[in-house]
Image (spheres, rainbow, N blue to C red):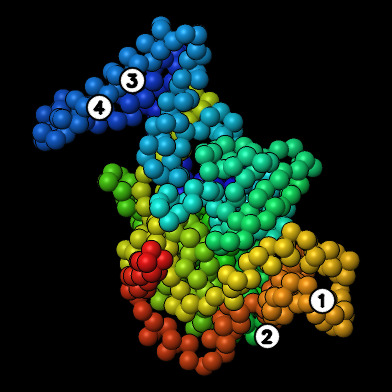
């Protein structure tokens, strides 16, 4: 979800006719939502003499009973509450509660304002601060704050240095621990040029304030360049134009006689399923890209490639992923991994592998998870993610450094230096690093990386091979001369996921001791 609403990164939206006119004349017809949405299939089976089980009959009776209770409560409140209540308020409150009860951060009631903004990101521009966010799954080891899944490059959130995995603790002084996803989105939105004040938590100890100036956000798609004889293609989102832009980049690589390709999906939080299928088709010679699995048979679908590949099958491919890679990114990475077409480098992806469909109710509506994505070899994405074949992480700060790093960020020292010295000499940079080491007691290597990251945020940099250890590893793999051996000896995606889950359980046990 971004700061105007979650992008429809599922299959083409389907509108189921009964639900489109359930809420027509009176909002007091809340129980009709249940009647039309859940009951017709069961009623038809019973009426037609189909082999309905006793369990189905019991469910039908229970559905009818709960729908009747909801109607009775609605009427009782209207008759007896101390003040007259707008029926729309009761309706929206009830609908919000229904979807919150599912415990699924991607299913939600959508009031009129949310329905109007649903397709902003896929249309190319929207207002906000440029952060893809997600409501983390609640649990004893998970704080209840909204998580930044990925900043959109070039936006206020990205330029401020907000990273994937950061938590938004408060917005304009209001804690987010009790806010719904839609309430967080509403607070992040606003008129371009106005400011919003956030408090960000990074890791267990580091917290710092960030002031962002809202802007019109343009959704980027691709960036590309040559690294010697290796083509580097970064996909920053999946929009209707992504596959065409990627094909243009590949044509550029071919004209420059590329011998390998790096597909960078880091911090790409997804977009359109169709775009993911089309991008996968650039690399795969026919076959399955992704499947959807649901308890509803009609929702079980297999999505195949749609065009001949444009990347020759003898071109080795490395895919870069991290925890900011989600949804459509995971579909592409999973397809290329399962089909033996690419070697994955980086960190385990976000794990957003569920299908949502949007159903209108008058001018409002709701978004409901109806299926889950699985890879061509039936590996589940949702809640697990896609682990890499080779784990490469950026060096992290030590817990003992958190206090001083927090002070450095709050002092805004690096941003001030980079703004005043957009192209510093080596002597200037060395002198500044020495001053920071003296002032904050942090390692010079960490400080240089922070300075370089800040510089990259202020200028159009396609890649930075000097500090990007994951990109360095991808280049080394492609130039190592044993790519086919690595690909053939790599573990299956299912095996990698099992190892990842075991490691996660071991870390949870260790943290509890």
Label 2: state its secondary structure: loop
What whole-number distance in Å separates the C-alpha atoms at marks 2 and 1?
Answer: 36 Å
What whole-number distance in Å separates the C-alpha atoms at marks 4 and 2?
Answer: 64 Å
Residue 179 at what x, y percent from top left? 54, 39
Which mark is on residue 435? 1
> Which callout, 4 or 2, points to the residue nearer the camera?
4
Which mark is on residue 63? 4
Crowding near the residue tagged with mark 1, few <14, some 14–19, many ≥20 C-alpha atoms within 10 Å: few
Residue 445 at what x, y percent from top left? 69, 80
Q: What residue sits right under mark 3 in the picture?
A: 70
Q: Residue at x 45, y 31 (%)?
A: 96
Label 1: state its secondary structure: helix
Crowding near the residue tagged with mark 3, few <14, some 14–19, many ≥20 C-alpha atoms within 10 Å: some
Among the 4 quarters of the image, the one containing residue 191: top right
Residue 294 at what x, y percent from top left? 31, 48
Label 4: state its secondary structure: helix
> Which callout, 1 or 3, points to the residue nearer the camera?
1
Vertical relation: 438 (above or below) 295: below
The answer to whether one can see residue 508 in this image is no
Q: Residue at x 16, y 25 (%)?
A: 47
300 horizontally vs 241: left or right: left
Among the 4 quarters of the image, the one containing residue 35: top left
């Amino acid at each position: 979800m971004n700061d105007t609403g979650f992008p429809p990164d599922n299959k083409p939206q389907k509108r189921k006719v009964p639900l489109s006119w359930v809420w027509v004349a009176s909002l007091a017809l809340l129980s009709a939502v249940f009647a039309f949405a859940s009951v017709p299939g069961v009623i038809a089976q019973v009426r037609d003499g189909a082999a309905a089980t006793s369990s189905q009959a019991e469910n039908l009776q229970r559905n009818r009973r709960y729908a009747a209770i909801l109607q009775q409560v609605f009427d009782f409140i209207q008759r007896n509450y101390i003040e007259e209540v707008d029926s729309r308020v009761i309706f929206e409150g009830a609908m919000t509660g229904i979807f919150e009860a599912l415990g699924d951060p991607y299913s939600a009631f959508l009031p009129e304002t949310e329905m109007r903004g649903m397709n902003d990101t896929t249309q190319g521009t929207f207002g906000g601060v440029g952060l893809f966010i997600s409501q983390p799954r609640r649990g004893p080891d998970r704080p209840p704050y909204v998580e930044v899944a990925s900043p959109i490059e070039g936006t206020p959130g990205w330029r401020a240095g907000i990273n994937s995995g950061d938590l938004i603790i408060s917005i304009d002084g209001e804690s987010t621990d009790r806010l719904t996803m839609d309430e967080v989105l509403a607070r992040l939105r606003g008129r371009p040029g106005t400011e919003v004040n956030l408090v960000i938590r990074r890791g267990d100890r580091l917290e710092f304030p960030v002031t962002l100036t809202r802007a019109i956000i343009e959704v980027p798609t691709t960036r590309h360049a040559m690294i010697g004889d290796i083509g580097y293609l970064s996909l920053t989102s999946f929009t209707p134009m992504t596959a065409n832009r990627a094909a243009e980049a590949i044509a550029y690589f071919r004209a420059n006689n590329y011998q390998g390709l790096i597909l960078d999906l880091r911090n790409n939080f997804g977009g359109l399923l169709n775009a993911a299928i089309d991008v996968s088709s650039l690399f795969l010679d026919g076959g399955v890209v992704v499947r959807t699995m649901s308890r509803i048979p009609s929702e079980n679908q297999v999505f195949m490639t749609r065009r001949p590949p444009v990347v020759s099958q003898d071109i080795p491919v490395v895919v870069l992923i991290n925890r900011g890679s989600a949804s459509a990114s995971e579909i592409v990475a999973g397809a290329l991994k399962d089909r033996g077409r690419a070697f994955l480098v980086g960190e385990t992806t976000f794990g957003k592998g569920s299908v949502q469909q949007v159903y209108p109710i008058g001018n409002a509506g709701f978004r409901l998870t109806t299926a889950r994505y699985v890879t061509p070899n039936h590996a589940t994405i949702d809640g697990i993610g896609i682990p890499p074949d080779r784990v490469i992480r950026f060096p992290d700060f030590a817990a003992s450094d958190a206090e001083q790093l927090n002070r450095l960020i709050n002092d805004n020292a690096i941003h001030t230096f980079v703004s005043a010295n957009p192209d510093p000499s080596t002597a200037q940079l060395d002198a500044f690093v020495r001053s920071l080491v003296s002032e904050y007691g942090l390692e010079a290597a960490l400080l240089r990386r922070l300075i370089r990251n800040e510089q990259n945020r202020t200028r159009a940099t396609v890649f930075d091979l000097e500090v990007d250890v994951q990109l360095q590893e991808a280049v080394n793999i492609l130039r190592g001369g044993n790519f086919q051996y690595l690909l053939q000896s790599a573990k299956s995606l299912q095996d990698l996921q099992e190892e990842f889950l075991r490691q996660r359980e071991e870390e949870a046990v260790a943290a509890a001791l």
